[in-house]
Amino acid sequence: MSSSTHSSRDDSFRNPSAGSSAPAGDPQADAPRRGWISEDWLAVLLGAVLLAIALSCALGSWRWEAGGGGDPEAAAAASEFSHPMRDYVGKPGEWRDNPLLAFNEYRAVGGAVLLVGLAAVVGGWARGRRLRHFIPGLVGIFALALLAYVLAGQEVVKNYNLEYALWALGVGLLISNTIGTPYWLRPAAMTELYIKTGLVLLGAEILVGRLVELGLPGICVAWIVTPVVLVTTFWFGQRVLKISSPSLNMVISADMSVCGVSAAIATAAACKAKKEELSAAIGMSLTFTVIMMVLMPILIQAMGLSAVLAGAWIGGTIDSTGAVAVAGEVLSEKLGPETLEVAATVKMIQNILIGMTAFGVAFYWVRFRESAVESETDSARPAVGLGEVWRRFPRFILGFVGASIVFSLLAASPSMGLLATETTAVTKGLRGWFFCLAFVSIGLDSNFAELAKQFGRGKPLLLYACGQTLNICLTLLMAWLVFEKLFPIVSAASGGG
Amino acid sequence: MMSPGRVAKPRQRVSVRPWRNGCWQLFAASVIIALVWGLVLPRLSRVAPIAERISRNHRAGIEADAMFYTELGPLRGVRWLRTPEGGRFERFAINR
């Protein structure tokens, strides 16, 4: 994704070839006025304001419920604390036959739409959009995002982990490739702003303290194998498969080795990938996730693995967090409840890796890759100086990492840990809406021909398949090594902690 | 009549009303989506293995479409407990 201030690639997350019904030369659709703040800093600002609103609402309630200092009753009240905005921020729910049932929690949907819509209007205004054009477009994009959420909420679709990102892309692509994106929708299709704001909110959910939940064994499985697979897959794509786009290679490598869609979004933003590259990576990831979610429990039972080893293997290999839980639950019935809990915890540790991955990829890209693109060589040299790195560095990553640090410190505090987790329980709903709007915008700005080009000669699919095979083998080896050899369990009984 | 040196291009069949064609395509896709989500998927959700998977997820309170661990639902997480005297992991404990 390009940034208006420091990117050298203006084509990233922008595709002028996408179908559009905009009249030629329409000034509003083609050339919005320049904003008074860069997109990256605007995303940081919007994310910070939303986090501050959620935190201050919680703080107000928190004092009221827990007031009384060391009073045991107050402590008990605090332990049952629930964020006052919880009922007012959410997404459409699950349904089977009647899609209207998705709106049972209509207050939550309405509240989230209102808050995110307000933030988007402020963002559009700050970026120089004319509000009389921007607001109707935003309403249209929200309607499509709502449709995507409803499609994703159908019981079968949801339980097979076909996430809203896929349907949001789908409805956008459907419109842009049939009637063309109406010109009145285009001013509100601010993909990068939505993604970057969503990522700043996501940063608050990356609580570093959670790393130690599985101790050293968990860190070994999630933090040694994952970077090794990420780097090896990227190297393989560049040197062996010779994939022409390093950013596509990086997004697929991160998506496959870290944790699916969320990692793909963060990495695509960090390495300024094209929109079609993100779409292609997500499409592949969700397809392989469904296959692995069904097949891995069967394979594990055939291999006769222990509950803990099975959980670690699933958690370290299946891309999507939800799919890990589903596969873990299938095995929990056969092997014991440890499978699900270990799988989910390993995945959570991998989730936390997103922050470092995004930061590392952004640094690598501005220091080595962008200079290579500018000098039109495939080599990753020469590196630019640190001053230049700072000038080019995507600033929203600072917001992303900053939110993670602030909320990790809050969560580590004995008295305010619950406050942090309750706040992120609200902001995760807002983050989901921002991502959904972003994927609708990507779909509206893409066409099937451009998307099909990303799969040219099947190299990306081959990259994914090879990388995932390495991931599966290495994770199994490492999980066996740490959970059965280096740190064996003396008595593998589950119990209250 | 063609000027010398110029090659005649084959006549391409170009629709005179692409927008109208697009409307038909969008209409057809919408009908397909309505049929799949309105009829096919609800019936699929009653097929035994699928229904079993769905009810298992419901029983465990799992959000199968979670993108991040914070969306997973009421999982408790685990801890490894060490032996008091040594560095070995003694047992595996599910949090309360």
Image: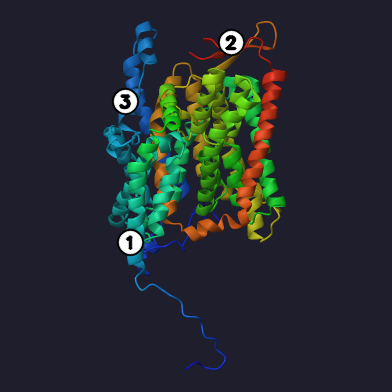
Q: Position of residue A304 (x, y in %)?
A: 64, 22
Label 1 sits on a secondary structure element that is: helix
In this view, A241 is above or below A93: below
Amino acid carrying label 2: it is: Ala
Give the camera-side residue of A349 and A341.
A341
Q: CA distance from mark 3 to mark 1?
A: 45 Å
Residue farthest to the front? Answer: B48
10 Å neighbourhood of mark 1: few (<14), some, or many (≥20)? some
Q: Which residue is mark 3?
A: A84
Label of residue B23 in the image: 1
Label 2 sits on a secondary structure element that is: loop
Judge whether residue A242 can be spotted in this image. Answer: yes
Count of labels in the image = 3
Judge whether residue A190 can be spotted in this image. Answer: no
Q: Nearer the viewer, mark 3 or mark 1?
A: 1
Label 3 or label 2, whichever comes before in sequence order: 3
Amino acid carrying label 3: it is: Pro
Give the camera-side residue of A351 and A300.
A300
Q: In which chain is the residue bearing label 3?
A: A
